[in-house]
Amino acid sequence: MRTELSFTDLPDIETELLAVLAVDTQTEKGPDAKPIPQLLTSNAAVTASAAAVLASGEFKAGANETLLFHAPAGVKAKRLLIVGLGKQAKATVHSVRNAAGTAVRFTKPRGIRELVFALPESDSLPPGPCSRSAVEGAFIGDYDPDTYRSDRQDLSVQSFTVAAPPTADKAAEKAAFKEGVIVGESQNFARVLVNEPGNKLTPTEFGKRAAAMSKEVGLACEVHSTKKIKELKMGAFWSVSQGSEEPPALIVMRYEPKGVKGGPVLGLVGKGITFDTGGISIKPGDNMEKMKYDMAGGAAMAGAMRAIALLKPKVRVIGIICASENMPDGKAQKPGDVQTAMSGKTIEIINTDAEGRLVLADGIAYARQLGATHLIDAATLTGAVAVALGTVNAGAFSNDDDTFAKFNTALETSGEKFWRLPLGDEYAEMIKSDIGDIKNTGGRYGGAITAAEFLKVFAEDTPWIHLDIAAMAWIEENRPYIAKGPSGVAVRSILEWVRSYSA
Ligand code: BES
Ligand code: MN
Ligand code: ZN
């Protein structure tokens, strides 16, 4: 998708489709309250062309509601698309991201290949952040997971233009717009990986894709396999891989900005299980095909590293992806086995399906060995997090309030929803083992929390954040602004958290 930024007056823009935003300005409640939609443009010609249809009451400016008409009077665009942002008081830069996605997903199946998106003119919606989020939303909306369909009609939108008000600060707009392109493309980079089936994206292939991306954006990247994993004594990681014909991959990406010597080193660790059968504690067949997305945490780290390399914050970052299959086999690990992790801690395996925490235990230890002073991990770790938070918020955990405060601030920019869940000694008790130091499951209750407690053992005294994205990484139903399938969740939030450490 080509993207452009324009400062041309809206009526003068020649395009197939001009998208303009509207809010519902009705503030009263009650049975007689009627929505009052208002266009977010100061342009008189555009406002006049839409006046009749807005007065008709057909369009309520609900969030992502759309209304299209042809040949708008006094405007050179062939079509005008009005996209609702919902109630005026609740409209944010994040509603603008979704509205841009909605505009693209409206346009795409209709074979219209270009659109112009008019930035909202509103005191509560600053143009810079809106440019960025509009471009992000356009990329997010443009993606469809239909790569392997032979009836795929390439209806991708070819050109997306953001029309900023002619009065906007041009340099600031350009910078924000450029950021949006990088972030949107990086989120889609992660989504493409997550969508790949287990037979295509093996751990080895994951390594190749990460290396190719790294080369493109100027990151240092090493991809190790069995030999190095054994050398490093990553007994927890290897215990998951030992039952698979496909070799594992330990992917290490490094971002080292010139002139940054001291300061923090951020360690990003992603779960990269390219297929999770459960191993000997095998999963039921229903929905098992979805377990190809068990590498979404790793993909999020790859996407974030891509964006970091291009946006160049002044802070060192190490990205680690622990990629493996989890398969049942004659060589596979068994419940009851005891494994020694890289840190020296012994782990009693209760359930071979609790494999994510095993690969991450050693990934986290390795990040610390490589000098990480602050850690963040992302993983499709537990079904239990879906029970706790549904598919609305992803789970977040931390052993350090200051570090987590920075993550919370990052969410204001990313617009992603994470909810912090507790940790504590009583939960840590639940994973104590009679046979070894800890066991890899903590029983039925509080499953997302005991999984986080397990990881905390390996973070030790390093400030650390854990993101459980199991319920958010795959979207089950189409939405107006995003296709069902891989969401690319966590890329934007991790990126913003990293940028918050920039010197
Ligand atoms: N990959 C799964 C978690 C998962 C479930 C991700 C559903 C996405 C959707 C993880 O490896 C797993 O199997 N977890 C077990 C842990 C249990 C055995 C303690 C689970 O959640 O059931
Ligand atoms: Mn599992
Ligand atoms: Zn898993």
Image (cartoon, grey):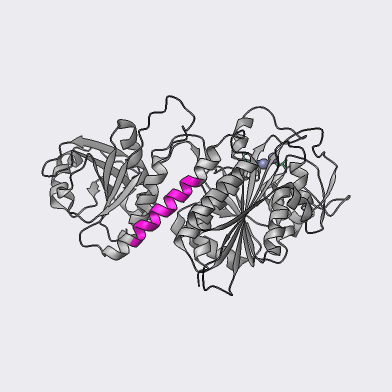
Where residue 42 sits, quadrant-wise, is: bottom left
Q: Nearer the viewer, residue 313 or 212?
A: 212
Residue 81 pos. (x, y %): 25, 40
Residue 149 within the segment the image draws in magenta: no
Residue 380 pos. (x, y %): 62, 45
Query: Does residue 455 appear in the picture of this structure?
Result: yes
Query: Does residue 487 appear in the picture of this structure?
Result: no
Which residue is at the far right?
435
Counting labels gives 0
**Vertical relation: 180 (above or below) 337:** below
* Ligand 3 found in image quarter: top right
Residue 340 pos. (x, y %): 82, 52
Name the image quarter holding the N terminus. top left
User: Range of the magenta residues?
Assistant: 175-189
- Name the dominant secondary structure of the magenta segment: helix
Residue 448 pos. (x, y %): 67, 48
